[in-house]
Image (tube, coloured by chain):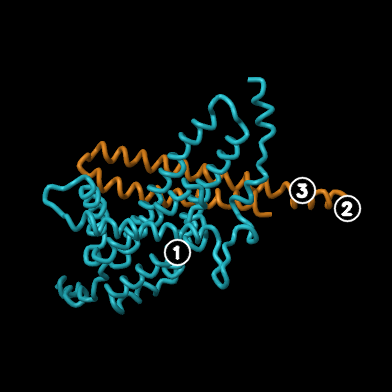
Chain colours: A cyan, B orange
Amino acid sequence: MPNLSAQLLAIDFSGLRDEIFPDTENHVIEAGWFVVNDSVFSGFIVVVALLLVALILRLTVIRKWKTTPSPVQMFLEWLVSFFDKSADEMTERYSGIMGPYTLGAAAYICCGVLIEMFGLRPAIADLGACLALALCTFLFIHTLGFASNKARRFKHYLNPINIVSDLAVPVSMTFRLFGSILSGMVIMEMVYILVEGIWFVGLPLVLPAILTPLFTLFHAFIQSYVFASLTLTFVQEATEKIPKKEGRRKRPKPEKAAV
Amino acid sequence: MELLITMIANFLATDGALLGAGIAALTGIGAGVGMGIATGKAVEATARQPEAVGKIRTMLMIGLAFAETTAIYGLLVSILLIFVS
């Protein structure tokens, strides 16, 4: 392979910056007052696709619900009961809310990353999308926390460290999601640029086919699972019953017990 | 003396960002050690009590997600240092 080193030297990585952090001139879709960037546009596509799939499944499979299930029905039952069961285990009383929420968030994250395979920018590779998902979780944690413990939850804030750690939750969820999706995207963009420059030994056919499942498919499933289970963990922590102050009255005083 | 200061300033302004990106990527060491310890302990726990494997897996996943976060922060900082400057 005498030509390989020359080909490797000729690869131009200068387009990478524009792919990762696109400028606001060429990558904005503008129609009157409607101004969005690439990520938001692919987010719209994901939402429309998910709604269409849900509608089609509702009209075809769920209408013909049987006791001897078809494969699609088996898959749907497995998917829904997976999230429902984990929500049931973690947040017993609120599993009716948390099960559908975690399924929806996981579906959006998963499809928002997988849209990268069609050549669009992933919907989650944008700080705003991650922040929106993390703020939804933040809202659920505190609403359910106050609904569960009423005013007794304010006792939790007597320790000022707890306020800081509560405020750190959405920030850490945002940057975890954003960082992992962005790093997967950076690696794939680098591979695409690399493959463009080397045009022999069939490498352009094989290398992306091996690496795409690793960095896109795997990432999508892992990150959506992690997001769902972290949401459930935080909600479980917030909705734990704080014991009332009854133990003090029932306990016999030590002096009397000694005498 | 003035030349030296100018040189250092130039270095920090151009190549210093790349050096910082390299240092920021070292967060992977801590995260790797932590995740390795967590996984090893989970394997030990599963070997000792195979019936608790579901609960152990959930805990391991959450622990790994927390440990991974620091590595992702480091990676994000180094990506920002390389490409946004």
The mark tally for this picture is 3
**Coordinates of residue A176 in the picture (x, y in percent):** 47, 54
Query: How far apart are labels 1 and 3 at the CA level?
Result: 37 Å
Q: Is residue A230 visible?
A: no
Residue type at numbered disc 2: Glu
- At 56% from the left edge and 39% from the top edge, which residue is drawn? A192
Q: Secondary structure under badge 2? A: helix
Whichever of labels 2 and 3 marks the residue nearer the N terminus, that label is 2
- At 28% from the left edge and 75% from the top edge, which residue is drawn? A147
| Mark number displayed over residue B11 | 3
Q: Secondary structure under badge 3? A: helix
**Coordinates of residue A69 in the picture (x, y in percent):** 16, 48
Query: How far apart are labels 2 and 3 at the CA level?
Result: 14 Å
Q: Is residue A151 visible?
A: yes
Q: Is residue A254 above or below residue B35?
A: below
Choose between A98 and B13: the one closer to the eye: A98
Task: Say which residue label 1 marks.
Answer: A170
Would you call the spot at circle 2 few (<14 residues within 10 Å), some (14-19), or many (20 or more)?
A: few
Residue type at numbered disc 1: Pro
